Image (tube, rainbow, N blue to C red):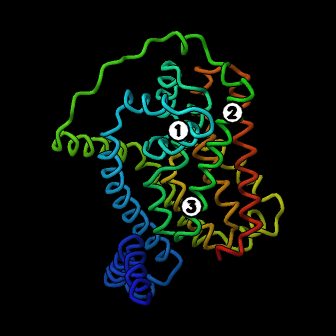
Amino acid sequence: MTVLKAIWSFFSDQILGMAWLKNLIGWILESLFGSDFVISRMGESVHFFIYDFIKISFLLMVLIFIISYIQSFFPPERTKRILGKHHGLGANIMGALLGTLTPFCSCSSIPLFIGFTRAGISSGVTFSFLISSPLVDLGALVLLVSIFGFPIAIAYVVGGLILAVIGGTIIEKSGAGNYVEDFVKEGAISEAEQETMTKRDRVLYAKEQMLATYKKVVLYILIGVAIGALIHNWIPQAWIETVLGTSNPFSVLIATAIGTPIYADIFGTIPIAESLFAKGVGVGTILALMMSVTALSLPSLVMLKKAVKPRLLATFFGIVLVGIILIGYLFNAINFLFV
């Protein structure tokens, strides 16, 4: 058991956490600017920015490549057939799980949602997929583990999947899922099967997806790391605790309200969450902020509005909003398990 713990500790700290990179950057900065700069507020901010940006970028590209390679075995037509074979709660669970294999932002998931609707897949499954896809993916799980450890990473993933399954189920059972625009129902879908890909084709596909996805999110990573460095080294902890601390009963509501107007990928929110966690912000408040940014951004809602009618849009927004708030308060109540 001791050996296993040592192996896991090495993997968590040096592979996922890339502690060696943090030490290397610190050594380089000290060599270039001196020890006084390294321990200064500006030096710590520069150190945080360089380290987090390189770490997140490297892990993200590796993970997207692996996920995209796996995803090459599940083209849209095959995914539709898999989802079409399941019904009821099991189908919604399958839709939520398949969403974890799509490293898309919410706006990119909407065309797939339209395709699933045209294919005759139930509204519960399509909305479970739509909620899960931007909210939870394998890449985010590994990055969360590298920064927060397994307990918080699993809490985020489980919370997101439960929200996706329950949200899809309510939308289907309430009948709100029928309120989609006519063009969505009437559009034709292609039944053509994607030609069999060779191993080389899959590698090239994964490489293209990796580069394309990274180009889409790199700006959000830069902004997120910059905000994280600002929170980590320049904003007094007392301010953070007053607004978002566990002693403030409205912290989850404030975090959700802050996150909803922001359009960013989950990878851009991770460094912000990292800094807030270091400042003592509750796990539930952090989860609420991350989930609201990724699942309820205004641009994605505007795009979704073109495909669904107001009743369905309001139902979707209300369910996800209430779900995020409940998850936030629940995990704040058990925050002692994570610190």
Give the mark, 2 or 1, whose residue is nearer the N terminus.
Answer: 1
Determine whether 74 is above or below 190 in the image: below
Location of mark 3 (residue)? 272
Give the mark, 3 or 1, whose residue is nearer the N terminus.
Answer: 1
Inspect the image, locate mark 2, and give the three-letter code of the amino acid beneath it.
Phe
Residue 45 placement (x, y as % from top left): 49, 71
Are the two marked residues, 3 and 1, in contact with CB atoms closer than 8 angstroms? no
Residues under labels 3 and 1: Cα distance? 29 Å
- The residue located at (59%, 66%) in the rendering is 152
Are the two marked residues, 2 and 1, in contact with CB atoms closer than 8 angstroms? no
Count of numbered marks: 3
- The residue located at (74%, 70%) in the rendering is 241
Tell me the quarter of the picture where residue 75 sits: top left
Q: Quadrant of the N terminus?
A: bottom left
Residues under labels 2 and 3: Cα distance? 26 Å
Is residue 22 among the parts visible in the rendering?
A: no
Location of mark 1 (residue)? 95
Of 79 and 136, which appears nearest the observer? 79
Residue 9 placement (x, y as % from top left): 43, 81
- The residue located at (74%, 23%) in the rendering is 311
Mark linked to residue 316: 2
Determine whether 186 is above or below 334 in the image: above
Residues under labels 2 and 1: Cα distance? 16 Å
Residue 308 placement (x, y as % from top left): 63, 21
Residue 20 placement (x, y as % from top left): 34, 79
Query: Is 116 left or right of 262, judged from the image as shown?
Result: left
